[in-house]
Image (tube, grey):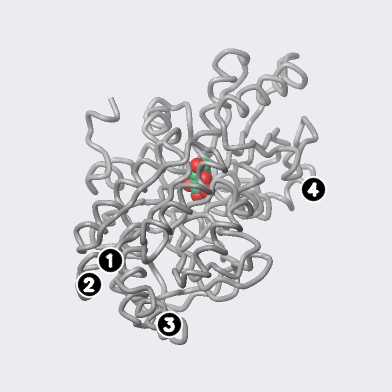
Amino acid sequence: MKMQRLAKMFLGATLAVSMLAGCTGDNGGAASTDGGNAGSSTTTATSTTSDSGNTDTAPAPANGTKVGVSMPTKDLQRWNQDGANMESQLKQAGYEVELQFAANDVQQQLSQIENMISNGCDVLVIAAIEGSSLGEALDMAKGAGIPVIAYDRLLMNSDAVSYYATFDNYKVGTVQGTYVKDTLDLDNAAGPFNIEFTAGDPGDNNAGYFFNGAYDVLKGYIDSGKLVVVSGQKTFDEVATPTWATETAQSRAENILSSYYADGTNVDVWLCSNDSTALGVENALAANYNGTYPIITGQDCDIQNTKNMIAGKQSMSVFKDTRTLASQVVKMVGQIINGETVDVNDTSTYNNGVITVPSFLCEPVFADADNYKTILIDSGYYTEDQLK
Ligand code: BGC
């Protein structure tokens, strides 16, 4: 597709941004399930207009329209699923696709994106390893008139970001925090209860939203002494986990257990922002802790963590159906290249340091051992065998 034609269409699309809510990819399966016991408000502005959220209404793209999809790593399960879903849904809609994974190496992601630009991609979809480190490639895309969609993680400090599609990241945190509050019945129980926090990668803009969402629910109980952070580590910087690595979360948890819990003190809650970090904490507990097993939160419903939920080693997770996000993004791509109004449902939350990026936030879904069959197996996300 001719770059100039695309740039013209894209300009048209940016002038007409619509406000929609919900994220109901037609193969999203579980997306209509409520966010469990979240029950709290989010910082995002959403309307209640319904949305088709599927890609089959978009007109077929021009022959040879190519989409570059840049994913951070194959090491964590979810990005493999995101990549595979994006590739198959884009191909199904008639696009050519260049899909790359960057092995959590920022330089590699930069050069992969630069290659996508020189290979003639018409639109870029990028899930950044580090949101702030892709400036050069984004400038190059802008210079070539190529629209960029930030996928799941916001691209920071750049005016070359056209749209952002993600899940409601703050709500993920409030779902986790509210689960802890309700499970311990913090408004009525005498307490005090001991809690530790493990958050995500400081280079990932999402990580602060997850942590703040959870902390905002629990802060009052920490301030009043009903929840006690025994290690004293309660700021995001103190509890962060670079690159979300399981091993890093595990060694920090081991240190905390040996420094603060070796005398038989119980840890009642370990609030983990996602499944890869929860897994590290679960490994540390298995080898270094004999007390009452804590409430542990997570996010993503990774296979190992879902098995742990079934086995009672993790209390809950937050399901973010990658099929739903992929279909929303495929729809966005179609709207951009056809010069149509691009569906967004949040135009105020996600400032990347330079611009506020029009965003589409999908709904995260509460998951535990009681509902996993409905949301994960009945929806076709996993087979029963995968969870054995
Ligand atoms: C994603 C989470 C994921 C984490 C680690 C975040 O940006 O939103 O779903 O658990 O990265 O990969």
Identify the residue under disc 1: 65
Q: Nearer the viewer, residue 183 or 347?
A: 347
Read off the residue under disc 3.
18
User: Disc 4 and disc 1: Cα gap in Å?
Assistant: 58 Å
Left of 243 or right of it: where is 98?
left
The amino acid beneath tag 4 is Ser
- Distance, label 3 to label 4, CA atoms, is 43 Å
Give the image location of residue 93, x and y in percent: 21, 63
Outermost residue toward the front?
A: 118
Q: Are marks 1 and 2 in contact (CB under 8 Å)?
A: yes
Please tell me how crowded label 2 is: few (under 14), some (14-19), or many (20+) other residues with Cα within 10 Å: few
Q: Name above or below for residue 210 compared with residue 25.
A: above
Under mark 1, the amino acid is Thr
Residue 218 location (% of width, % of height): 68, 49
- Tag 4, which secondary structure? helix
Residue 150 point in image, percent of width and height: 49, 60
Which residue is nearer to you in this view: 138 or 168? 138
**Label 3 C-beta lies within 8 Å of the nearest ligand 1 atom:** no
The residue at the point 59 percent across, 74 percent down is 348
Which residue is at a point 54% across and 57% down the rendered structure image? 137
Residue 43 located left or right of residue 359: right
Q: Which residue is mark 4?
A: 224
Q: Tag 3's secondary structure?
A: strand
- The circle drawn on residue 62 is 2
